């Protein structure tokens, strides 16, 4: 079992003719994902790797019954791409693009209110259900099918955690990157809720970082609702206040959003915290009583 | 991106926010002329990108043009140390000379993103002139908020609700509403991340006015804010951070002596954390990004090594997309070109890792290879402490 995506997911790429879109569409297809369509305005009627390209998302949905989309279009056009996908009724929208202005995302979130589409990202690696469906830019080969759910604000740090799990013999049910921007779609809580209800997920790794209060909110939710063991890590324990650490959302502002606050909140919710980023896999072994 | 107070006031004025009449001056004769034009009685304010200027002696009252020159001489060209500048302080190359005003009350008005709601929120307080974080900590009941619906913007009823709750006199409420709406228009149209008027003053003559102003901008939106980008003051930024931004590298200077080069922001932060856990101190945060190539790695190397405090370098790359052989070649080339003299530990994982490791070991350079993050951190801390 898995969450969000599986072998049946039919995926559309928005921005399929750009270098990034092409590279990752090909990689996802090779992984076994059903890449059914591409959209680039003005390139309709052509194809890439025998995937048909459409001018509009609604055209692609009508032509291929795509039910998920992955967006690689440049930042100035990303918000428009997300809204076009929502308007076309796509149920899962995954925006990989990094650098989308906050003002655009505030409007996108408002636009999504009352619609059935769900948004993952932007500025995220995407989602993978190992062995079944990979949508995004994560390296497929480090993943193994299994029962650990992974949810994270980071990209490469998630790969690090997944790599540790795989090496220790713990495969993953699904791995979800919610992204490093201050305004984004899926929150930790949304993904944790899905993992909680997924019979194929035995335990969850949650990787947060400085900035905002999403980890504290997740900790509160976990304390009240989570039935499965959760292992956590927070990046940025040595980050100085007031500086944006790469991710637009990774900033300690007004003394709020520090790693210490988050770690305390997560510990008090019963989450087993890895003291070092090198010990995420090992901490999961402990949590599952495998040590 | 930050701008100066005088620049923020120019923007706000264009949007209809009342501000005191003022002139920017970078020399004492300019100060004198400005003060004379303003009628003698004025305020001289240091223009640096840091808060706490008043307490640090960067804001002075003057009673005449001569007095203004005397006061400006104590600030201009000097280093101002506030609680936000760090001990080295900032050099003041400009002052804002402003008309004196008759203050009746000082309030706080700010706008900032509320991440939990994904909306811009207006924040007000009756405690003006004090840092809002301090008010929030000591008197949370004195903080008033209104979330703004992006579809319609800040509505007059919301502004009135705030104004009445602040105890603004009946006859001034209309002016207050106009000011709040003007501030939101500026915030929205200029892609602000913070806009703050602190203090917002009510004058004895019944006016509302922005006595101070602070604006920060979303760096992701600067591509469409050319006028704002033109206000960037490079003297206020770390030279290495400026250099890094030219190559789309994300670099932040820290206080330690171990330079780090990592791909991905989360992994970069985690790498700093593990260095600290092993007893070392990171010299920087540096994210070379997912699509790092040989040239970017070389540039990143140069920036790292331009920091004279760096006693060792740790490279931690989880090459998902990026091939380890390409990275290794970039590291070897850059290390040769720069004839690196400090210990270098490289940890690579991902595609073509064996080939990458071979390139490092065949290079003949004294590169220390590590298999895991923990091993890499231990090795660099040992090497630096030796």
Image (cartoon, rainbow, N blue to C red):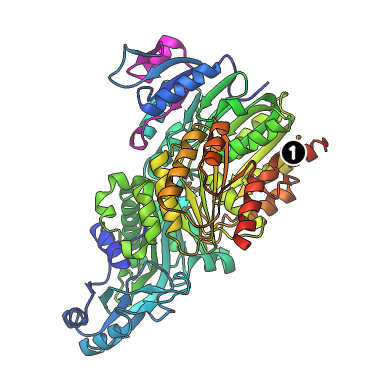
| Residue B76 horizontal/vertical position (percent) | 29, 79
Q: Nearer the viewer, residue B311 or B156?
A: B311
Query: In this picture, which residue range is highlighted in magenta?
Result: A49-77
Left or right of residue B154: residue A166: right
Q: Residue B204, relative to residue A211: is it above or below?
A: below
Q: Chain of mark 1?
A: A
Left or right of residue B183: residue B40: left
Q: Is residue A67 magenta?
A: yes
Density class for disc 1 (Cα within 10 Å; few <14, some 14-19, many ≥20) is many
Task: Identify the residue at horizontal 32%, vertical 79% (top origin).
Answer: B102
Task: Identify the residue at horizontal 63%, vertical 45% (top origin).
Answer: B373
Q: Is residue A271 visible?
A: yes
Left or right of residue B363: residue B337: left
Which part of the image, by quadrant, shows the C terminus of chain A? Answer: top right
Q: Residue B198, relative to residue B289: is it above or below?
A: below
| Residue B186 horizontal/vertical position (percent) | 31, 53
Q: Residue B292, relative to residue A12: is it above or below?
A: below
Which part of the image, by quadrant, shows the N terminus of chain A? Answer: top right
Q: Is residue A99 visible?
A: no
| Residue A46 horizontal/vertical position (percent) | 32, 12
Q: Nearer the viewer, residue A106 or B386?
A: B386
Q: Which residue is mark 1?
A: A284
Q: Nearer the viewer, residue B234 or A9?
A: B234
Task: Identify the residue at horizontal 57%, vertical 26% (top origin).
Answer: A140
| Residue A110 horizontal/vertical position (percent) | 44, 37
Considering the numbered disc 1 on the image, is that residue within a helix, a strand or a loop?
helix
Q: Quadrant of residue A205?
A: top right
Q: Quadrant of residue A154?
A: top right
Q: Is residue B9 magenta?
A: no
């Amino acid at each position: 079992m898995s969450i969000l995506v599986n072998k049946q997911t039919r995926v559309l790429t928005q921005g399929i003719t750009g270098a990034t879109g092409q590279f990752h569409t090909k990689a996802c297809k090779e992984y076994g994902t059903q890449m059914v369509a591409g959209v680039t305005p003005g390139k309709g009627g052509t194809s890439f790797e025998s995937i048909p390209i459409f001018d509009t998302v609604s055209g692609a949905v009508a032509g291929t019954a795509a039910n998920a989309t992955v967006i690689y279009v440049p930042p100035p056009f990303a918000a428009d791409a997300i809204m076009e996908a929502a308007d076309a009724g796509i149920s899962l929208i995954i925006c990989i693009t990094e650098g989308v202005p906050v003002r655009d995302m505030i409007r996108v979130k408002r636009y999504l209110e009352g619609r059935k589409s769900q948004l993952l990202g932007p500025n995220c690696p995407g989602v993978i259900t190992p062995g079944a469906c990979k949508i995004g830019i994560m390296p497929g080969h480090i993943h193994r099918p299994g029962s650990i759910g992974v949810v994270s604000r980071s990209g490469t740090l998630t790969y690090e955690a997944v790599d540790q799990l795989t090496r220790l013999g713990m495969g993953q049910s699904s791995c979800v990157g919610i992204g490093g921007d201050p305004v984004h779609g899926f929150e930790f809580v949304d993904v944790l809720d899905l993992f909680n209800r997924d019979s194929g997920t035995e335990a969850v790794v949650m990787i947060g970082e400085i900035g905002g209060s999403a980890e504290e909110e997740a900790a509160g939710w976990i304390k009240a609702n989570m039935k499965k063991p959760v292992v956590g890590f927070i990046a940025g324990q040595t980050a100085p206040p007031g500086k944006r650490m790469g991710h637009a959302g990774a900033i300690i502002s007004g003394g709020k959003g520090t790693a210490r606050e988050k770690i305390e909140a997560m510990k008090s919710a019963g989450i087993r915290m890895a003291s070092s980023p090198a010990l995420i896999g090992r901490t999961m072994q402990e949590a599952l009583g495998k040590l | 991106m930050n701008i100066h107070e005088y620049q923020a006031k120019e923007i706000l004025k264009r949007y209809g926010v009342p501000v005191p009449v003022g002139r920017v001056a970078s020399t004492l004769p300019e100060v004198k002329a400005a003060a004379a034009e303003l009628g003698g009685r004025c305020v001289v304010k240091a223009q640096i990108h840091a808060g706490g200027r008043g307490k640090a002696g960067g804001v002075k009252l003057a009673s005449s043009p001569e007095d203004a020159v005397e006061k400006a001489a104590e600030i201009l060209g000097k280093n101002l140390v506030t609680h936000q500048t760090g001990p080295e302080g900032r050099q003041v190359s400009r002052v804002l000379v402003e008309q004196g005003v008759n203050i009746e009350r000082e309030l706080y008005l700010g706008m900032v993103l509320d991440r939990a709601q994904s909306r811009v929120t207006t924040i007000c307080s009756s405690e003006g002139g004090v840092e809002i974080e301090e008010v929030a900590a000591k008197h949370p009941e004195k903080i008033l908020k209104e979330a703004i619906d992006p579809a319609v913007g800040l509505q007059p009823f919301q502004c009135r609700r705030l104004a009445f709750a602040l105890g603004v006199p009946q006859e001034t409420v209309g002016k207050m509403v106009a000011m709040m709406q003007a501030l939101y228009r500026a915030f929205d149209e200029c892609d602000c991340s913070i806009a703050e008027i602190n203090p917002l003053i009510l004058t004895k003559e019944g006016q509302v006015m922005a006595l101070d102003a602070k604006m920060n901008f979303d760096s992701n939106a600067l591509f469409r804010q050319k006028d704002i980008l033109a206000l960037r003051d490079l003297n206020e930024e770390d030279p290495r951070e400026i250099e890094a931004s030219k190559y789309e590298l994300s670099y932040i200077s820290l206080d330690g002596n171990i330079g780090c080069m990592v791909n991905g922001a989360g992994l970069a932060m985690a790498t700093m954390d593990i260095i600290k856990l092993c007893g070392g101190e990171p010299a920087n945060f540096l994210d070379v990004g997912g699509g790092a190539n040989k040239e970017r790695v070389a540039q990143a190397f140069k920036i790292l090594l331009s920091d004279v405090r760096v006693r060792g370098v740790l490279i931690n790359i989880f090459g998902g997309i990026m091939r380890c052989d390409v990275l290794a070649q970039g590291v070897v080339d850059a290390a040769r070109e720069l004839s690196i003299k400090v210990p270098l530990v490289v940890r690579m994982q991902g595609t073509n890792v064996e080939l990458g490791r071979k390139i490092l070991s065949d290079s003949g350079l004294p590169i220390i290879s590590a298999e895991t993050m923990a091993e890499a951190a231990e090795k660099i801390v040992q090497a630096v402490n030796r």
